[in-house]
Image (cartoon, rainbow, N blue to C red):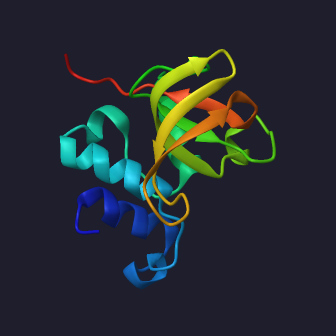
Amino acid sequence: MGTSRARETLARDGGSLDGYGDANWCDMFISWVGERLGFTDEMGSDAWTVAHARWFQQNGRWGTEPRPGAIVFYAWSGGKDSSDIRHVGMVVKKVDDDTIEAVEGNTGNAVRVKTRSSDDIVGYGYPAYRS
């Protein structure tokens, strides 16, 4: 949590590093991957899934089509609004019209590739990866 974005998140949330010890870490994982690859500016960074999805929406990088490398946002309630989002992953591939595979953190307290139904998907954030 030593990055400038981590400090911004702590300031916004009014929290402390200790407060994140038991937090759901799915979006922290996605943000960490982006930071490690040098793509923080291209894919955003947040510990809160709702704020991360809204970042993609505000930057005109939001949609409904799965693409490899896209950030996928889930709502287990079946809701389709960004406020319904509860989990996040990164698309590996589209399996068929109703199913994707994604790598996700905090899935069974591990990083795993999961197959997910489109019924649980709110939308996708499209990082502006450099060519």
Q: Is residue 62 visible?
A: no
How many numbered badges does the structure rendering display?
0
Q: Position of residue 48 (x, y in %)?
A: 53, 56
Q: Position of residue 69 (x, y in %)?
A: 38, 28
As drawn, 125 above or below 20: above
Query: Splitting the image into 4 quarters, where does residue 103 fall?
Result: top left
Q: Position of residue 113 (x, y in %)?
A: 47, 43
**What residue is rendered at 45% in x and 80% in y?**
21
**What residue is rendered at 44% in x and 28% in y?**
70
Quadrant into which the N terminus falls: bottom left
**What residue is rendered at 28% in x and 24% in y?**
129
- Is 55 displayed left or right of 44 in the figure? right
Residue 55 or residue 89, whichever sits in front: 89
Q: Is residue 85 visible?
A: yes
Q: Position of residue 49 (x, y in %)?
A: 55, 50
**What residue is rendered at 71% in x and 44% in y?**
75
Quadrant into which the C terminus falls: top left
- Is 116 displayed left or right of 61 in the figure? right
Query: Splitting the image into 4 quarters, where does residue 118 fall?
Result: top right
As drawn, 91 above or below 31: above
